């Protein structure tokens, strides 16, 4: 567990955190196993709300000659002979979600309903507990030996609504410490919206930080917000920078995200969020 002296905020703008593990698809693991694992967790008594979702595509952070680039004028299609599913389970309070598919185990804290933000030192043990439950389930199903972890993943989603640290387009450049926002007025044109993506290598090739900024409106509301998302992801036991254990990767991802959030936002904004 990370114990670094990291920045902390009394009123952080984070509205969702995601901790996850990716693994190679397990031969013989079917949609029936998803239901069996839900029952093992206590079914509706523990996770009363369930839903099916399209499975997430595998994501890999590669470097050097294997680094993947977005190709212009191409359409990527994923085909599978068996329709797989991603199971989404929510707790009664609606502030926790556990997601499982053949290749991913993901744990979300959901704060959109006003739930108090739990710190990483609380979320990580909760994820660890569910991960060990899944490993125990695979062991009983004679599938654990075929599980090969390949990627760790941490994401923080921040909502920065209008009326907090900004009130107009002209204020956007004062929220961040990097040149994410172009001039508010350009010739006879006025800036209306903004969106951007940036990628950083977590040296030396231990992973990658992905930073995304988007101007949007909050669902079921007319409130404008800046959605500031930071995702850290990296390989497990692969390549020269791959970490041997997912625990080390998750801790690294958390530290990179928290420090990067501090470095990318302005002192004025951090004061509003009660930086400690």
Image (cartoon, rainbow, N blue to C red):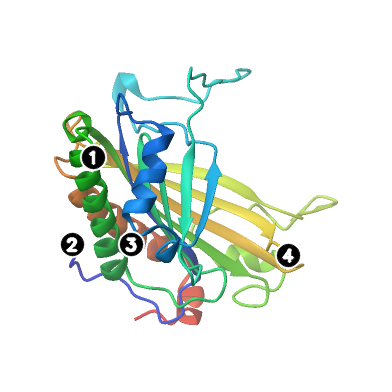
Q: Are marks 1 and 4 in contact (CB under 8 Å)?
A: no
Residue 67 visible in the current orientation:
yes
Q: Are marks 2 and 3 in contact (CB under 8 Å)?
A: no
Q: Secondary structure at mark 1?
A: helix
Provide the residue designation for mark 4.
Answer: 220
Residue 209 visible in the current orientation:
no
Q: Which residue corresponds to the image point at 36% horizontal and 57% vertical from the top-left? A: 257
Decide: is 58 above or below 243: above
Q: Quadrant of the N terminus?
A: bottom left
Decide: is 126 above or below 84: below
- N-terminal of the pair, mark 2 or mark 1, is 2
Decide: is 212 above or below 25: below
Q: CA distance from mark 2 to mark 1?
A: 25 Å
The residue carrying pointer 3 sits among few (fewer than 14), some (14 to 19) or many (20 or more) residues within 10 Å by Cα, namely: few
Provide the residue designation for mark 3.
Answer: 259
Provide the residue designation for mark 2.
Answer: 1
Q: Which residue corresponds to the image point at 63% horizontal and 48% vertical from the top-left? A: 195
Q: Secondary structure at mark 3?
A: helix
**In the image: residue 164, left or right of residue 168:** left
The location of residue 228, given as percent across then percent down, is: 53, 58
Q: CA distance from mark 4 to mark 3?
A: 32 Å
Q: Are marks 3 and 1 in contact (CB under 8 Å)?
A: no
- N-terminal of the pair, mark 3 or mark 1, is 1
- N-terminal of the pair, mark 2 or mark 3, is 2
């Amino acid at each position: 567990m990370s114990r670094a002296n990291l920045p902390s905020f009394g009123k952080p703008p984070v509205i969702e955190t995601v901790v996850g593990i990716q693994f190679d698809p397990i031969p013989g693991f079917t949609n029936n196993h998803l239901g069996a694992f839900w029952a093992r967790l206590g079914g509706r008594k523990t996770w009363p709300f369930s839903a099916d979702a399209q499975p997430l595509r595998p994501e890999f952070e590669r470097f050097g000659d294997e680094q993947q680039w977005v190709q212009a004028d191409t359409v990527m299609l994923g085909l599978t002979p068996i329709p797989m599913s991603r199971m989404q389970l929510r707790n009664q309070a609606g502030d926790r979600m556990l997601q499982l598919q053949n290749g991913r185990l993901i744990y979300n804290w959901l704060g959109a309903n006003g739930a108090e933000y739990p710190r990483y030192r609380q979320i990580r043990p909760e994820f660890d507990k569910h991960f060990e439950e899944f490993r125990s389930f695979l062991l009983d199903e004679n599938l654990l030996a075929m599980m090969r972890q390949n990627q760790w993943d941490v994401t923080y989603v921040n909502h920065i609504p209008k009326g907090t640290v900004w009130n107009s387009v002209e204020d956007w450049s004062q929220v961040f410490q990097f040149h994410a926002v172009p001039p508010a007025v350009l010739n006879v044109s006025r800036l209306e919206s903004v969106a951007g993506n940036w990628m950083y290598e977590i040296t030396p090739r231990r992973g990658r930080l992905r930073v995304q900024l988007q101007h949007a409106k909050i669902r079921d509301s007319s409130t404008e917000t800046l959605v500031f998302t930071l995702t850290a992801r990296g390989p497990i036991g692969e390549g020269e920078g791959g970490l041997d254990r997912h625990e080390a990767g998750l801790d690294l991802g958390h530290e990179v995200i928290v420090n990067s959030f501090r470095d990318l936002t302005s002192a004025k904004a951090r004061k509003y969020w009660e930086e400690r």
